[in-house]
Image: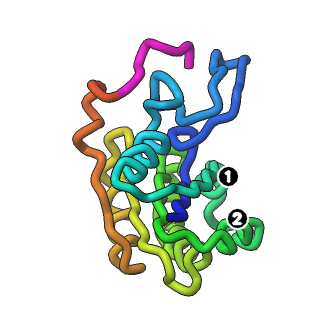
Amino acid sequence: MKVLFIGNSITLHSPAPDIGWYGNYGMAASCEENDYVHTLCRLIEQRGKKVDAHVYNAADFERNPDSFDLVTLSNLRDFQADIIIVRLIENVPRDKLQSFGAAYVKLLEYINKNRRGKVFCTGSFWKNDEGDKILREAAFEYGASFISLEMVQSGEFQAIGQFEH
């Protein structure tokens, strides 16, 4: 089963010693095996499916939704994932939230051009009602499933205080 993860530092962040980050996994986790990418892959494999995962940090798309060139993501589209999980919103500047929604739909259309894969869009890791509304509407417009992350926003499921940044 091919699974594509598109997200920001919560999905994948390479080492950045200048901010006290030495991992090469999702920043919201205490260790690699606890980030959501590795946890979900492990759960799928426990159900008898071999996972071929591709993980991509799309923070640049978040920061520049109006000018981001989707063609740079052709390798993600060519991966032809069975499942696509999109975990974005935290780095979108407030003044670009509305345009982000339209760009987000275009991203989904580009990545899953033939609509081969099942798409799951998550809400914000941090409380962001306006951002979640935009994501929910974009997921609905595209025909993707929307998954709220409200249950993890309390801090109980976050590695707060375990890292410098």
Q: Classify 10 Å Cα crowding around label 2: few (below 14), some (14-19), many (20 and above).
A: some
Instruction: Say which residue appears at 41% left-offset and 22% top-offset.
Output: 159
Instruction: Say which residue appears at 53% left-offset and 73% top-offset.
Output: 108
Judged by its main secondary structure, the magenta piece is: loop
| Residue 104 tag number | none
Q: Which residues are magenta?
A: 158-165
Instruction: Say which residue appears at 50% left-offset and 56% top-offset.
Output: 50
Instruction: Say which residue appears at 63% left-offset and 36% top-offset.
Output: 13
Asked if 107 appears above or below 148 in the picture, the reply is below
> Furthest-front residue in view?
48
Q: Position of residue 26 (x, y in %)?
A: 53, 36
In three-dimensional space, the C-alpha distance between marks 1 and 2, rounded to whole angstroms, equals 7 Å
* SS under mark 2: loop
As shown in the figure, which amino acid type bears the numbered disc 1?
Asp
* Residue bearing the label numbered 1: 60
* SS under mark 1: helix
Residue 103 shown in magenta: no
**Badges 1 and 2: C-beta atoms under 8 Å apart?**
yes
| Residue 68 tag number | 2
Asked if 100 appears above or below 124 in the picture, the reply is below
